[in-house]
Image (cartoon, grey):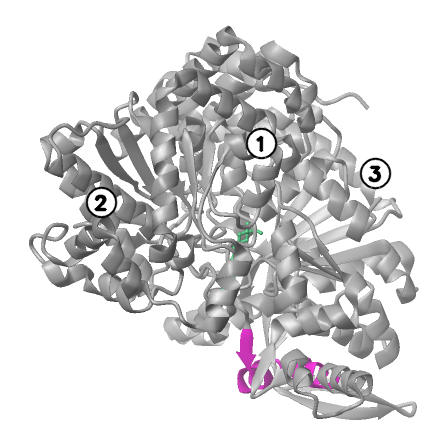
Amino acid sequence: MPTTQFDKESIKQSIIGKLQRYNGRTLSDATNQQIYNALASTVRDQIMQKWVAYREKDKHSTAKRLYYLSVEFLTGRALHCNVLNLCSIDNYRQAMEELGIDWRAVIQEEPEPGLGNGGLGRLAACFMDSLASLSLPAMGCTIRYEYGLFRQKILNGQQVEVPDNWLENGNVWEVPAMEDVCQVNYGGRVETEEVFGRTRYVLRDYYSVEAVPYDMPVAGYDCETVDTLRMWRARSVKTMDLHSFNSGDYTRAMHEQELASVISKVLYPEDNHYEGKELRLKQHYFFTSATLQYALKDFKRRFGNDFRKIPEKMTIHINDTHPGLAIPELMRLLMDQEGLGWDEASWIVQHTVAYTNHTVLSEALEKWPEDMMRNLLPRIYMILQEINRRVCARLADHYMNGTDPRIAGMAITAYGQVHMANLCVAMSYSVNGVSQLHGDILKKETFHDYYKFSPRKFSAITNGITHRRWLMGCNEGLRDLICSAIGDGWVRDPEKLRDLLPFRDDAAFREAFAKVKYQNKVAFSNRLASHQDVKLNPDFMLDVQAKRLHEYKRQLLNALHIMVLYNRIMDDPNYTMTPRAFVFGAKASPGYYMAKQILRMIIAISKLIDRSPRAKEFLQVVFLENYCVSAAEFLIPAAELSEQLSTAGKEASGTGNMKFMMNGAVTMGTMDGANVEIAEQVGMDNIYIFGMRADTVSSLYREGTYSPMHIYESNSELRKALTQIIDGTLMPENPAALQDIYHNLLFSDPYFVLKDFGSYSMAQRRVNADYQDREKWLKMAVTNTACSGIFSSDRTIREYNEKIWHLG
Ligand code: 26W
C-alpha cells in the first residue's frame, strides 16, 4: 500500500478550510494558536487514514502483541515528529511558506504533554517511536493526567511550582475509545462462594470508578504502522446523582464525580523517591487493571478461551515496579472472572509478564504498607499473600531451611510491607537492567539472591533514544551536514553514522560541523532571550548539566567547581581561561528539601558572577527555567560539554548523556550507567572520565570510614569554596540560608562530592586546554556523533524483541 501523502496544495486548502469552519477566521486574522490547531488537525487527518488502514489489518492479525505499561510517557510535542515520520516535512514547510506562516513559531504553540518526570518517562516515549518505526505491534498504556509535571518558575532565586494545565485548549491528537470503557473496583470485602465444588472469591460493597481510554496514534517512520498510546481517564460511574441535583444539592451531586476524577488528576512529581501515598497506589491499580481488562478482552476476541496461549500472544511489559499490580490483577481476572485454577493462572502470569528495573536507590524502591493494600484492594492483597506463601515455601525448600535470613529479603510481604520489586522479580519471566553496569549491579547486589535462584531470567539491555526526535528533528543543521557527507543510510540504520569517522580529518567538514554548532548556540541563546530575558554569549564554550535535581546526580560537584574557577579569576589579576557558559536545567521535587537548596545555590552563584565585571569576562551561569522536552530540543543541539557526574553505581543508565553525544557534545562523566558504554564507543581520548569507580564506591559504603572533613582540610581551593556557601559571599542578604548544604557536605557527604572533587577539577583543566585546540576539540565532537548510532532506541527495541518479547 502506498504511503498516504498530502500534497502541498491540499495542505493549504485544508488549513484555510479548517480556520474558516472551526474559527470563522481567514488566515490573516487567525492567531498562531488557531493556525496550530488547523495545521495539527490536517496532520492528524493524514495519520488517521493510515491508522484506520493499519487497525483494520491488525484486527485480524494473530501476531503476538506488546502492552507496555508505564505510569509515565514523557512524549513531548507531537506535531513536528509526526510530520517527520510521515516524511512530509517538505510538503508542509512549503505549504506554510506559501501561506506566509512561520512554521517554527506555529509548532511552538503546541502545549507539551509533560506526562513524566524524567528518564523513565522519556524512555517510554522513545520506545513507542521505535516500536512503530520497526513495525512491531504495541500499545503503550498509561494515565491521562489532567495536570502533567509542574511548570517551574524561578522567583527570588527559588523554585516555584505552577500547575501544568496542558489540556486547557484541547488535545488534537487524542481520540476517545468509548467501546473500551471499563470499571475498576476499590475497597469492600472478599466473600467466598462454593460453586460446583469450587471456591469462588467475590468482592462485595466495593466502589467503582470508570476508566475511559483516550488513544493517541504513534506513526512509525516511513512505514504503514501506526501504534497506539492509550491513556486512561478516571470518571465517576454514576454520571450525576439526579435526585440531589434536582433537590438543589449541587455540591453533593458533583462530589461523586470529583472523587473519582482525582485518580487521573495529577502526575506525582517524584523521581527516585518513593512515598507510600494511597492516591498513588490507586493510580497504579487504576491504569493497570483497565489495561489488563482490555488486553484480556482483546485476547478473547482473537483466540477465544484458550488462555494457555496467552504467553504466546502477548507480553505485558512493566516499566519499573509501578505497574507491578499487573501480576496479581492478571491472576485475579483469570481465576475470578475466567474460572482458571491457581496453578494455571500463575503459570500464565509467569510466562507473560516482563519487568525492567530503572533504579537501585533504596529510597526509590516501592514498598506499600500491607494495611493500605488490604483496605484498598482486598482481593489483590489475598492473592499477594498467597504468592508470598508459595514463594517463601519454595525458597525454604531450596535453602533446606525455613528460617534462612535470605528468605525475608526475598519475600513479597514482610515486616508489614508489600515489596513490589520482589513481587516483580519472583513472578516475571524476564528481569532486565538498563545498562551493562546496572545489569551487573542487579545481579551482584540488588537482586543477588534471586539471581542465584534463577540466573537465566536476568539480562541487561542498554537504553537508547530515538534519533528521529533527538537528531533529525531537533538538529536539522547537523542532519543535513551528515547527509551531505555520508548520504542518508544512517536514517534507517543509525550505526552507519560511523561512516562519519574519516571526516574527522577533513578540515572543511570540521569547520562546517563547528558552524552548525555555532548556529545552534545562537538559536538557543535567542530562545533564552525571549523566554527569560538572559543574554548568553554564543562565543563562550557551552557547558551543560540538564537532568532532574538530585544529590546523587551531583549538580553540587559542578557548582563547587564553578566557585573554584570564580576564586581563581578574582584572586589572580593575571589569570585567564577559556570563557565558559554553564547552563543548568533541573526541576526539584517539591518536597525534596536538599534539591531545592542546591537549586538556590546555583542561582546564587549565577548572581554572584553577574555582579562581578571581571568574573563575567570568563564565566556565565544560566539557570534554564522549566527544563522540559521542548527546552531540551533547543539546548542539546547547542551543547559542547555534557556533564554526567553521578556517583558511580547510582545512575542506572542515563539517556540525556546519549542525546548530548549524538549532537556532538563531549562527555565529562564518571564510569556510571551508560557513560561506561559511551567511553567504550568513542575511546578514552574522546571523553573525560573522572572519579571513583562503582566497585570502589560500594566498598567505601560498606566500610563506612569515609570522612569528608579530611578532604576539606587538605584542599584549600575546595575549602574556600565551601566556606563561601555560608560566609555571605553567595548569600549576602542571608548568609545562613544554605548552611544545610555546607553541613551535609562536611559531616556526611553521602554521594562523595568532596571525594571526587580533585579528580573532577583535574579533568576540567584538561577540557579548558583542549577547547583552545580547535582542531582537537572538533575531532572529539565529530567522533561523538559518529559513534552514537548504537544508542538509537531502534537498537534497544530490537534487543528487547530478540531477547524478551519475540513479537510479530
Ligand atoms: C515511586 C517514586 C519513583 C518514581 C520514578 C521511583 C523511581 C522512579 C524512576 C524509576 C526513576 C527514573 O526515572 N529512573 C531513570 O530511568 C532512566 C531510564 O531507564 C535511566 O536512564 C536513569 O538512569 C534512571 O535514573
Give the residue displayed 83% in from the left and 58% down from the top: 299
Residue drawn 42% across the image and 22% down it: 104
Residue 563 spot, x, y in % from top left = 22, 45
Extent of the magenta region: 367-386
Q: Residue furthest top?
A: 508
Mark toward the start of the polypeptide (1 vs 3): 3
Looking at the rendered structure, the secondary structure element under dot 2 is helix
Task: Find numbered disc 1 in the image and state the secondary structure of the residue it sits on.
Answer: helix
Q: Is residue 385 magenta?
A: yes
Quarter assignment of residue 625: top left
For marks 2 and 1 on the same chain, the one whose residue lies earlier in the sequence: 2
Q: Is mark 1 within 8 Å of ligand 1?
A: no
Q: Quadrant of the C terminus?
A: top right
Residue indicated by mark 2? 563
- Pick the residue in front: 771 or 155: 771
Which SS class for mark 3? helix
Badge 2 vs badge 1, beta-carbon distance below 8 Å: no
x, y percent for residue 274: 47, 69
Q: Report the Cα–Cα distance between label 2 and label 1.
A: 30 Å
Task: Count neighbours of disc 2 (C-alpha within 10 A) and say few if under 14, some if 14 to 19, many if 20 or more.
Answer: many
- Disc 1 to disc 3, C-alpha distance: 43 Å
Of the numbered discs 2 and 3, the one sitting upstream in the chain is: 3
Nearer the observer, 109 or 366 = 366
| Residue 597 visible to an observer of this rendering | no
Q: CA distance from mark 2 to mark 3?
A: 61 Å
Q: Amino acid at mark 1?
A: Val
Please tell me which residue lies in front, 503 or 170: 503
